[in-house]
Image (spheres, rainbow, N blue to C red):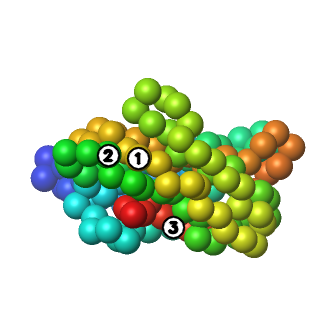
Amino acid sequence: MSRRSVMLGALVALVALTAGLGLVGDSRAGQFKRLTGSEALAPGGMIIVHASPRNQATAMEIDVYEWLAAAAPAPVPYRCRILSNLTGQRLNLRMIGVDGTIFSSCVAPAGGSCDVAPGASTPSHLHQCTVSTRTGAPVLPTAHYILAIQRL
């Protein structure tokens, strides 16, 4: 086999492996995901993420979404939202500040939605939204939810 054939084969294998790991596209469960564009949202604008969560033992793996607040002379209000919950379980949604403080939280019932209370974000700083279930509450194999970060 020529060196070129070996290199081409390795490249094809790498592309296949990358696609298999889900490094392109929608969010995967149990992963940290930094969302881009939140600092440029107009008031009322949202970033929407589709997620297919997975279980770890008897609970869903915690999904963590990090986003950047707008640069402004004063704090800008944002909120985290679950727009759709098709996981078969209640989802706990929390909005976390730069110091780890939970700004607010809500629970999206199975088949439902929820919005955390708006929080005044620290300008030009990263904040987080986390999504989880509880021990003894695994999600369905076909689980799916839609999360949004909204500037108010």
Q: Where is 10 relative to 52, above or below?
A: above
Q: Which mark is residue 75?
A: 2
The residue type indicated by label 2 comes to: Pro
Residue at point 71%, 41% (across, down): 56
Type of amino acid at the residue the image marks with label 3: His
Q: Which residue is mark 1?
A: 120
Image vertical order of residue 129 relative to residue 139, above or below: above
**Closer to us: 88 or 82:** 82
Q: Can residue 141 be spotted in the picture?
A: no
Looking at the rendered structure, which numbered label has been put on residue 50?
A: 3
Relative vertical location of residue 46 with respect to residue 33 in this rendering, above or below: below
Residue 85 in sight from this viewpoint: yes
Earlier-in-chain disc, 2 versus 1: 2
Could you tell me which residue is drawn at 45 percent across and 36 percent down?
A: 97
The amino acid type of the residue labelled 1 equals Ala
Q: Position of residue 31 (x, y in %)?
A: 50, 44
